[in-house]
Image (cartoon, coloured by chain):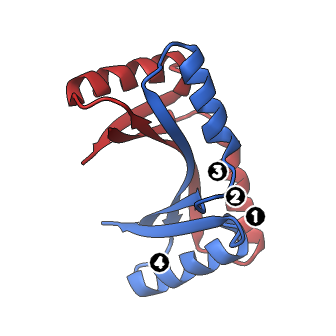
Chain colours: A red, B blue
């Protein structure tokens, strides 16, 4: 069993409504020294696979097919040891 | 300027519909060796603050007031150097 995290973040220049709204809410709550907030999605995945190479390949395919939208997202895969 | 990430994850035992639905979709797409998926929210925050202690305190308060729901979430704060 291997564990991995897949981090999916918006590409630079793509609107980030969740981040922007969190920033507004924080400013309204009095946190005036917060300058920016970016929202990132992380999927923590358990794989029934021992081979790290195969796991990484599988995770790449998952990102391309489901987890990330290549038009707006960039993603990074981290195997946890 | 300090950067930090705040990781907000569901407590053990709390239903994770986003993780569960991602798992189902991956299985349907043929990724049968995916055993579990957990969904984690990460906020990347830019703070106009140089003092790390003050920044951490501010981030703690943000978590308690807005970013996390103590009933269902646990959170961790990481200052980026």
Residue A73 position in % (x across, y down): 51, 29
Give A76 or B80, whichever is nearer the viewer. Answer: A76
For label 1, the SS is helix
Q: Can residue B2 be spotted in the picture?
A: no
Using the image, name the chain to which the residue with label 1 belongs: A
Q: Residue under circle 2? A: A22
Please give left or right for residue A18 compared with residue B51 in the image.
right
Give A30 or A40, whichever is nearer the viewer. Answer: A40
Give the Cα distance between marks 4 and 3. 19 Å
For label 3, the SS is helix
Labels in figure, total: 4
Q: Do labels 3 and 2 share a chain?
A: yes
The numbered dot on residue B60 is none
The numbered dot on residue A25 is 1
From the viewer's perspective, is residue A35 above or below residue A19?
below
Q: Do labels 4 and 3 share a chain?
A: no
Q: Residue under circle 3? A: A19
From the viewer's perspective, is residue A8 above or below residue B54?
above
Marks 1 and 2 in Cβ contact (< 8 Å):
yes
* Mark 2 or mark 4, whichever is nearer to me: 2
The numbered dot on residue B49 is 4
| Residue drawn at 54 percent across, 67 percent down | B75
Earlier sequence position, callout 3 versus callout 1: 3
Residue B80 position in % (x across, y down): 35, 64
Give the Cα distance between marks 1 and 4. 19 Å
| Residue drawn at 54 percent across, 45 percent down | B38
């Amino acid at each position: 069993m291997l564990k991995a995290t897949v981090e999916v973040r918006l590409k630079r220049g793509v609107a980030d409504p969740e981040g922007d709204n969190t920033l507004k809410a924080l400013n309204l709550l009095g946190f005036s020294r917060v300058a920016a907030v970016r929202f990132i999605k992380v999927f923590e995945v358990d794989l029934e696979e021992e081979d790290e190479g195969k796991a990484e390949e599988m995770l790449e395919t998952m990102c391309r097919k489901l987890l990330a939208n290549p038009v707006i997202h960039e993603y990074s895969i981290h195997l946890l040891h």
